[in-house]
Image (cartoon, rainbow, N blue to C red):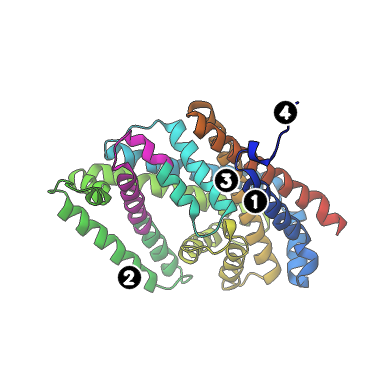
Amino acid sequence: MRRVGLSSIPGGRRTLVGAGVVCVVLLAVAATPHLLGSDVRQAFGGLEHARPIWLWTAAVGFLGALLCNAWVWRSAIRLCGGRIDRNRAVACYGVGSLVNTALPARVGDAARIALFSRAFGGRRDRYWTSGSVFGAIGAARALVLAVLVVAGAALGALPVWPVLVLGGLVGAAVAVAYIARGHHARRHVAHALDAFRALGRSPGGGARIVGWVAAATIARIGGTAAIAAALGVSDPVLAALIIVPTLDLTTVIPLTPGNIGIGTGTVAVALQSRGVDLTKALTTGIALQAIETAVSIVVGAGGALYLARFGSAGTRRRALALAGAGTALLLIGSFSATVLVDLV
């Protein structure tokens, strides 16, 4: 009988070590209410009083935001001459979300660039082009975020100064698109401007990209408002208009996997500035983080399975490993939240 060792497992020791780290982190999360202060314990306890129908509505909103973000990539890739269908776009974007959930520093964005680069076939410069798509989408997000910050500032909930920074980024992107539109890429590195070059030649395509980003933002605002409504926060739509741009502004460089902790604290501070008590503000942040993370894990695991079904042998092994990791994250997280919290 053949012996099965670590070398026969995809990823070997690294996979097992990673799984162990995930288990430790989730067990620590389960014990968090009892290890931290009374405010945090009360915040976790407040989740019991949330209205389930609104939490499910929030999940639908976050799912809609994820789908729209995937189709932002598809629209930009098609503008650059790539070919990708809606299902594969969702799969690639979902896997990136799954990686961001498990790893810090937006490593999932690098995974997305690599996965979406396959839409450009066997071109040697496909990674440069895919990276340019990421940059162009970032400019579109900055534009939509600037509009959102202006709305928040008009309500007296947000400062105006971020608009200057965001406006500068958008202005720089427009200038690059205008200058690059009349030039052809002669070197590999020049393909880093492919998306901006395409935007300069097709303003209508740029409008579609901005439209998808706006749709994703509206869906996320709707999901956030549903969480606020589930927990009894007064004026949940206004709360969402404060939370979403604040999160986007403060999580540009996340330092923890899935931005765990930082996002919750940001939501709490934003709501407290509007007179919401600390416990309810923390509860809202915890719920938002949990539901967004769960949606990312489910879609990411499904995307990994999709890529495993239609990819090469090497891709199938990596995708199946990701899908298994995502499923384990979801199951262990659910078990920790529903069973272990009551035991510790």
Front-lying residue, 6 or 286: 6
Name the side, left or right, on which 180 lies relative to 142.
Answer: left
Q: Position of residue 149 (x, y in %)?
A: 41, 64
Q: Main secondary structure of the magenta part?
A: helix
Q: Earlier in the sequence, mark 1 or mark 4?
A: 4
Snapshot quadrant of residue 172: bottom left
Front position among marks 1 and 4: 4
Label 1: how many residues lie within 10 Å, few (<14), some (14-19) or many (20+)? some
Q: Earlier in the sequence, mark 3 or mark 1?
A: 1
Check if residue 191 falls in the magenta segment: no
> What is the spatial separation of the Cα atoms under label 3 and label 2, in whole angstroms?
31 Å
Is 209 above or below relative to 162?
above
Write the residue at 70% across / 57% down. Answer: 25
Q: Earlier in the sequence, mark 2 or mark 1?
A: 1
Front position among marks 4 and 3: 4
Q: Residue beneath label 1, please?
A: 18
Label 4: how many residues lie within 10 Å, few (<14), some (14-19) or many (20+)? few
Q: Residue beneath label 4, please?
A: 2
Q: Position of residue 47 (x, y in %)?
A: 73, 56
**Which amino acid, mark 1?**
Gly
Name the side, left or right, on which 175 lies relative to 234.
Answer: left
Q: Are marks 2 and 1 in contact (CB under 8 Å)?
A: no
Q: Residue beneath label 2, please?
A: 164
